Structures are given as structure tokens and as C-alpha cells.
Image (tube, rainbow, N blue to C red):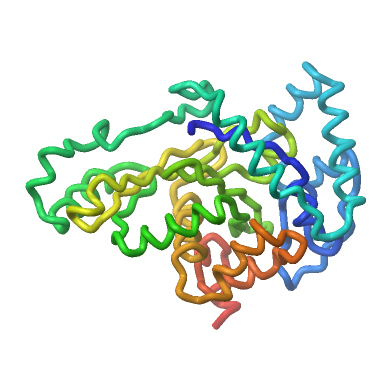
């Protein structure tokens, strides 16, 4: 779907920790001591990523002051709830309900509903080619474009897809110079939608996707490959940042390491046990996103 219309539904509470979670989804590096979150509008402005969302927040404040105040109050309520509290089932239900009302095109961000493989590739023509030839065509076509793309082996996608059916959402951490910015990834069919946690908290149920990964399994059985590409909102993400999130999907959903995938299961089914710092630990151990954090490579040397 073009924008999953994410609704907070208590999600932020599962991630809350006074000593680590900065306002609206920014987590400082583990070695950094972070002060308390603050409250209300001042807490929003303290966030290093506030500038990216300033216009939307101010528009909401001007056009719907009651809604704006209500969301600030909900943030305060979330912070009063026990660490680990989450209405994860309700969050998923909200996602499913919102999906039903979407049209064929999104009016926000230019994302495409049901972006087909035929709109990119002549499927009938490439069926005559080998998997390696198709891979070369796919990579050559997208190499000149500022986007994310991949050719995924059928066995790996089978594992990802099987797990996505059981665990349709997860929390990803994007390394930033200032710390970590949280993104929620939600599967909708073979599309995977990402929206930043700050976007959810500032816009509620109207929060649009900022990145969509499109997976095409049409050639999976015959050629043993699944093609993937993406659309992103360039106001919030650039290609190498989107690539980092895409790589994390394979890190957490295609891993052979049971402890890594267990984080995904915990987030979906035992949210009271979910530890966001475990996500950070896995990400740092893998080395993903190291180029997004200047100096991190030397720190690990």
C-alpha cells in the first residue's frame, strides 16, 4: 500500500526508557548518557530530527490545535505506562483496517499502490532468459537510479516471507550522527512499508510511508529469484539510508541465528519482553550502517 497510515496505538510505550529513548524515536548510542525526555511541545523541539518535521507539526498545530494538544497528551500518557507496555495486537489491527480504505494511488509522497513488475520489466520476454541474465538486466537498469534494489535468492525470500506472515512488523534503528532514529516496518502483502517513529507520533493515523520495498515473486518458481526495488520520500531518506533499512530486513528476517530472529518474534508476540537495545546490539555487531556513523569503524577497531 502507498502509505500504511500508521497509528501509534501504544507502540511508543514498548520502546520507552527514560535513560535511553529521546523524544519521538531518537535513541542515543549506548555509551552516551541521555537526560530525561522533557514534556509537551518543548520535548518535540529538543529532538535533533524535529527540523525535518517542523512544517507538518506547525501546520497541524495551526489547523487542528485540539488534535495537536491531544497527541501531546497521549505522549505523556505513554510515558506514564510501564516499560514494555504495548498494544501490539491493536497496532496490527489498525494497520489492517486502514489498508482496506486505500485507493490505487497515494496522494502523499508519490508512492504507487500495487506497483507491478510488468510496469518495470517485460516479464514474458525475460522468461526466455536465465536467472543470471535477468539479474544483470535488473541490476543494470537500477544502477543508474538513486534507489534501492536487489535480486533475492528464492530460498532466502521463502524464509523472509514465511516469517513475515507470523511477524508482520518490526522496529528498525537507523544510525545517525546524532544517535539512532527508529523506523517501524510493516508488511502489507509483498510490500514492506517504513515510517519513522517520530512521524507516527506527530501525525498519528495519517502518517504516510517514507520508504516502500516492493518484492516481486513472479519469477521465483521458474528462475529461483525474487526481484526487489523501492520508492522513498527523498525529503526524509536518501538511498544509502534506505539501503541500510533494507539490509536490516535480511539481517532480522533471513537470519540463521535464532537469537536474532527471536527479537522479531518478541516484538510481535511478547512485546512486554521486547528490548530495543538488543536491536541496537545486533545492528552494531553486524556492521550495517557503519558508514552512516562517522568514526564508528575506528571505534570498533
Residue extending farthest top: 63
Picture quadrant where residue 7 is located? top right
Q: Residue at the spot x=80%, y=41% of the render?
A: 45
Eyeballing the image, is 176 above or below 256?
A: above
Image quadrant of residue 275?
Answer: bottom right
| Badge count | 0
Q: Name above or below for residue 141 compared with residue 132.
A: above
* Left-right relation of 274 to 254: right
Q: Residue at x 58, y 75 (%)?
A: 259
Q: Nearer the viewer, residue 98 or 50?
A: 98
- Depth check, front residue: 33 or 205: 205
**In the image, is residue 44 above or below residue 139?**
above
Residue 142 coordinates in the image, percent (x, y): 28, 45
Q: Left or right? Give the position of 296 relative to 71.
A: left
Quadrant (top left/top right/bottom left/bottom right) for the C terminus: bottom right
Residue sitting at the far bottom: 301
Q: Residue at x 76, y 48 (%)?
A: 87
- Residue 182 at what x, y percent from top left? 65, 52
Q: Residue at x 55, y 31 (%)?
A: 99
Q: Position of residue 107 (x, y in %)?
A: 52, 21
Residue 29: x, y in percent? Answer: 70, 66
Residue 79 horizontal side relative to residue 31, left or right? right
Q: Observer-nearest residue: 121 or 176?
A: 121
Q: Quadrant of residue 76?
A: top right
Amino acid at each position: 500500500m502507498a502509505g500504511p497510515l500508521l497509528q501509534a496505538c501504544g507502540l511508543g510505550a514498548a520502546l520507552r526508557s527514560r535513560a535511553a529513548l529521546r523524544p519521538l524515536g531518537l535513541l542515543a548510542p549506548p555509551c552516551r548518557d541521555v537526560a530525561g525526555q522533557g514534556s509537551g511541545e518543548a520535548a518535540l523541539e529538543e529532538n535533533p530530527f524535529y527540523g525535518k518535521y517542523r512544517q507538518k507539526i506547525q501546520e497541524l498545530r495551526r489547523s487542528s490545535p485540539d488534535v495537536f494538544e491531544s497527541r501531546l497528551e497521549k505522549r505523556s500518557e505513554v510515558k506514564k505506562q510501564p516499560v514494555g507496555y504495548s498494544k501490539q495486537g491493536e497496532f496490527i489491527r489498525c494497520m489492517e483496517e486502514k489498508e482496506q480504505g486505500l485507493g490505487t494511488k497515494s496522494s502523499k509522497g508519490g508512492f504507487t499502490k500495487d506497483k507491478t513488475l510488468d510496469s518495470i520489466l517485460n516479464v514474458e520476454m525475460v522468461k526466455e532468459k536465465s536467472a543470471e541474465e535477468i539479474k544483470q538486466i535488473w541490476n543494470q537498469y537500477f544502477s543508474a537510479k538513486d534507489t534501492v534494489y536487489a535480486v533475492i535468492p528464492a530460498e532466502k525470500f521463502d524464509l523472509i516471507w514465511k516469517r513475515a506472515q507470523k511477524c508482520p512488523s518490526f522496529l528498525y534503528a537507523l544510525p545517525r550522527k546524532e544517535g539512532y532514529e527508529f523506523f517501524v516496518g510493516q508488511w502489507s502483502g509483498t510490500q514492506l512499508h517504513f515510517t519513522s517513529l517520530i512521524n507516527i507520533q506527530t501525525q498519528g493515523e495519517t502518517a504516510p510511508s517514507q520508504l516502500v520495498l516492493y518484492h516481486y515473486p513472479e519469477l521465483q518458481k521458474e528462475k529461483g529469484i525474487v526481484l526487489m526495488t523501492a520508492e522513498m520520500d527523498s525529503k526524509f531518506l536518501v538511498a544509502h539510508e534506505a539501503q541500510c533499512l533494507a539490509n536490516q530486513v535480511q539481517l532480522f528476517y533471513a537470519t540463521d541465528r535464532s537469537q536474532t530472529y527471536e527479537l522479531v518474534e518478541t516484538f510481535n508476540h511478547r512485546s512486554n519482553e521486547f528490548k530495543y537495545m538488543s536491536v541496537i546490539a545486533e545492528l552494531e555487531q553486524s556492521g550495517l550502517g557503519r558508514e552512516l556513523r562517522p568514526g564508528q569503524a575506528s571505534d570498533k577497531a
